[in-house]
Image: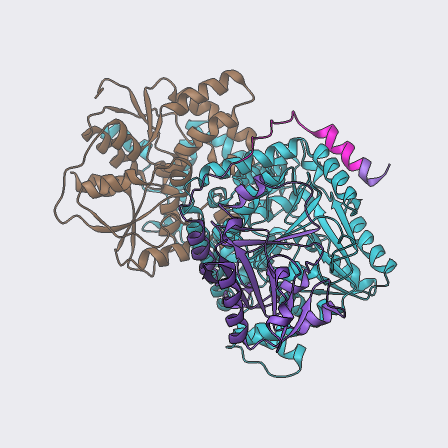
Chain colours: A purple, B brown, C cyan
Amino acid sequence: MSARDEILNKLRSRSRQPDTHPPAWRSRRHFDDLAERFAESLGKSKGEVIRAGSLDEAFEQLDQTLLALGARCVVANDEPPLSQIDLAARWPGMQWHIVGRTPGDLRGFCATADAGVSSVVAALAETGSVVVTSGPGKSRLATLLPPVHIALVPESCLTADLYTFTAARQGPPPAMQTLISGPSKTADIEQTMAVGVHGPKRFIVILYRD
Amino acid sequence: MSESKRIALMVTCLVDQVMPEVGVAAVRLLQRAGYTVDFPTEQTCCGQPFFNSGFRDQAVKLARRAVEIFEPYDAVVLPSGSCTTMIRAEYPHVLEAWPEWYERARQLAAKTYELSEFLVHWARWQPPHVANAPTLTYHDSCHMNRLLHLKQEPRTLLTAAGCTIVEMNESDRCCGFGGVFSIRLPEVSNAMTAEKVRRAAATEAGLLVSSDPGCLMQMRGMIKNTPLRAEHLATVLEELTR
Amino acid sequence: MTEVTFKQFRSAAAGAIADPRLQSAIDGATLKFRTERHHALTELPDVDAMRDQLKAIRAATLSRLADHLETFERQATATGAKVHWARDAAEANQIAIDIARQHGVELIVKTKSMATEETHLNHALIDAGITPVETDLGEWIIQLAGEPPSHIVGPALHKTRQQVAELFSKEVGRELDPDDIPGLTAEARRLLREKFLAAGLGITGANLAVAETGSIVLVTNEGNGRLVTSAPPVQIALVGIEKIAPTWDDAAVWLQLLARSSTGQPLSIYTTAITGPAKADDPDGPREVHIILMDNGRSNQIGTGYEEVLECIRCGACLNACPVYQEVGGHSYGNPYSGPIGAVLVPLLFGLKEYEALPHASSLCTACLDACPVRINLPRMLLDLRRDEVQGRMLSPVERFIEQAAAYVLGHYRLYRLLTGTARIFQRPLVRGRFLRVPRRVNPAGERDLPSLAKRSFHDLWDEIR
C-alpha cells in the first residue's frame, strides 16, 4: 500500500465521531478611521507611513522619498498606479527596471537596486499590514531584495483586519501572497531588535486618498 | 448563616503529620466564623500523590475512601488549595469509569471548599482589623490559583485583618514542589524554589504566606539563609484574630 | 535511538542550572516573550472567544483529518504543486534528497522548521553530499555551533552575543564586535544573501497548510521565508499532517493567535502563502513546488486520549510560561521539541520508554495550560503518560513497591497512625526544629531541608481541641 493510502486509512480507522466545524469567525473590529489606525499600527512595528491627499501628491512624495534615499537604481512592479506613469521619464537621472517590461536580468537588478516600488492589493488597518501578491508584472524579489521597499497604498484598499480580508477573498489565490507588517527584523541575538536581516531595512508606505 | 450545618475538616496528610498547627488554626477560624467543626478521624490522604505519579489504581482507592468518609457532611473544608483541587477537579475524573462513584464524587466536589474560599464566600466571615498586623508577601499556589481561581480570597482575609501585602514579582509562579517531582528531579525543583524565595525575599516583607502546606514545606526547606519566615494563611490569621 | 533517562535529564538539567550565563539568557528571553504575549493578548477584547474558536477549529479538523488532507492534496495538485506522503522521518528525508538529486542541487537554503528538525533533515542531506544552510538567524547560529535548537521560536536564545560574535567571526575570517548587534546582523545578511542567490533548492516547513486552496503558509519576521520561496527555482515544504486549516477563515484565527502568542506581535512581519509554483507569466518564483505530508507518529494519536496534542500550533508560549523549562533550558529535553509540549509530544511520537523522564519534567503547575492559545491540556496528558508508565511497568520495582506500600498504609488509618507514630520515635535523633538533619549525599531532596514530623499529629491533638 502506498504511504498515502496507509496514512489516510489509518486516520480514518482511528478517527472518533467527527465534531461539527465551528462557523467562521467574523471580524469584531470597528475603526472609525481606518487610515489612522493603519498608520498607528505600522508605526509600532517600525514601518514608515507618509500620508498624501491625492495620487499626484503620492507621486510627489515618492519623488522626495527616492531623492532623500539618494536612490540611483530602482525596481518597480508593473501595476497600477505605477503603470499609469512613465517612471523613467519622470526620473531621468535614475536607472529603472520595470518588471516585465525592462529587458535584462531582473534578479540581478533587484539584488543591487537601492529601492523596490510596488502597489498592494489590500491593507489591514488593525495590524498595519499590506498585502502584496505575485502575478504578471509583479515580482517577488522586487519588494524583497532591495534595502528599501516603498508601497503605494490607496485608502480605498484599506480593510479592518485579517478577518475582513479573508472573508472578502474571491477566486483562486495567486501563487504567492504576502502580508507585510513592517521592515524585516530579528531578535535572535539576545532579544535585541535589529532591522533588515534578510528583507528590506526600511518599509515605507505612501498612503494616499483616492 | 447555618451553624447547624455539619462541617468536616479534611486536614490533609501533610498538615496532619508535618504542620498540625495549621489544622488547629483552621478549626479555630471556623469556630470563630460560627461553625462547629467535625474531624472524621479515619481520614488519611486525598490520594493526590498517587494520582500525580501515575498510580491510578491507588488514587482510585483513596478517592473512594475519602468520598465515603466525607459525603455525609454538608460541607468539607481543607486548609490546602491543591488537595481541594484534587477533590473538586480530579475525583470525578478519576472515578468516571464507575457511574455511581462518579456521581458521588461530583456531589462531594460540589460541597468541598478551600479554607479561605469557605470563610469569604460561605461563612462571609470578616476578621477584625488588627493594628500592627504584619507586612507580608503572598504566594499563589498553582492549583488554587489557576484551577480553582482563588486569588483574591486569601488577600481579602489578610487585608481585612490589617496586613499589608507587598506583591512579589509573579506571585503565581510555581514554588517548585510538585509532589513527587521534588524528589524525582530535586535539582530542578530546588532551583525553582530558590527562584521563588529570591522573589519573595526581594519584597523585604519578611513573612511569606501561602494557603498550601505542600508549597510551605518546600519553601521552608530552602529559606534557611534568608530573613524570610514561611507560614500558612490559617496560622497567620488565627494568631491575628485571637 | 536517542534516550532521555532520569539520569540523563537530571545531569543535563544540573549543568544548565549551574551555568549563570545560560540562566540569564533563558530568563531574559522567556520573560520578554511572556510579557509581550501578555500585552498582545490582553489588548484583544475578545481573546477568550478567539481562543475557544481556535480550539474548536483544531479539534474539529483533527476529527476529520483524512478528509481535509485529501482536500489539501487535491487543491495543491490542481495548482501544479506535487504532493508527497511520508510515513516517517526517513521517508520524508529520502523524498527531499531524491528531489535535490533530480535537480543536481548542491546547495540548499532552509527556513526554520520544527518538522525538519524532527527528521534531522540536515544530517541526512549532508550524508547525501548536499549542503543545507539555515537562513533564520537563530537557526544559522546554532547550525554554525553544531547544536540543536533550544526553543521552538527562539532556537538560539541560549547563545550570548559574545558566542554569536565568535561563531560569525570564524565564518567571515575576521574579528567581529560582540556589542554591535546590528553589525553582526548585517554580516549575516551579506553572507546569507549569497547563499539565497546561489541555492538550487529552498526547503521550508509550514506554519500551517490551508486545505481549501492547497496553500502553504509561512510566518517569519526576517523575510527568509519569502526569500527561500522566491529565489531558488525549486521549493520543498515539509509539513506535519496535523498542520491543516480547512479554510482561510480558520487560518486567519490561527495566524492571529500564533503571532500574538509566540512573539507578542499583532501579526508577524511577513505572513506568506505559497499556492503552487509560479504561474507561467509570473516574473519570478519557484518553477516547482513539492509538498511532503509527513505522519511520523502523529496518526497514532488520533482517536486516543492524546489526540489533543496534535492541536499544537508551535507558538512556544508553553515554554516561556514553564518554570521547569526556564531552569533546565531546551537542550535538557534531548529533542528539538522542548518544554511542556516537548514533554508530552516527544514520548508520544518517539517512545515513552526512550523518553521516560520527560513526563516527569513538570511540577504540574498548569502555567502551560493557561498560556496555550489552543488550551491544550498538557498537564492532563503528562498525568496520563505517567499512568501509562505505571501500567506498562516501566518504573523501577523499588519505586513501584514504595508507592504501593504507601497507598496501602494510607488506605488503612490505624496502620497509618501506627507507622507515623513509630516514625516519630525513630526520627528523634535527626530532628532539628522543623527539619531533619540528613547528610546531603543521602538526602533525596538534595540541598533542600527535609521536614521533620511534628511532635504530635493533628490526629493526636484533635481530642484536646475539639
**Highlighted magenta segment, given as a residue range:** A6-25
* Viewer can see residue C354: no
* Viewer can see residue B67: yes
Splitting the image into 4 quarters, where does residue B53 fall? top right
Q: Residue furthest left?
A: B131
Give the residue drawn at x 24%, y 40%.
Answer: B156
Query: Is C81 drawn above or below residue A116 in the view shown?
Result: above
Instruction: Please state the horizontal and vertical placement of residue C387, each as a whole percent of the image.
Output: 59, 35
Give the residue drawn at x 73%, y 42%.
Answer: C295
Instruction: Please state the horizontal and vertical placement of residue C161, each as a whole percent of the image.
Output: 53, 72
Query: Is C17 drawn above or below residue C434 in the view shown?
Result: below
Number of numbered callouts drawn: 0
Q: Nearer the viewer, residue B209 or A175?
A: A175
Instruction: Please state the horizontal and vertical placement of residue C42, each as a whole percent of the image.
Output: 41, 46
Q: Nearer the viewer, residue A46 or B225?
A: A46
For the N terminus of chain A, which image quadrant?
top right
* Left or right: C274 as drawn, with respect to A36: right
Q: Residue furthest top?
A: B100
Q: Is C389 covered by the magenta stretch?
A: no
Q: Nearer the viewer, residue A166 or B95?
A: A166
Q: Residue furthest bottom?
A: C174
Q: Is A8 covered by the magenta stretch?
A: yes
Instruction: Please state the horizontal and vertical placement of residue A156, each as a whole percent of the image.
Output: 51, 49
Give the residue drawn at x 76%, y 70%.
Answer: A104
Query: Is B41 drawn above or below residue A58 in the view shown?
Result: above
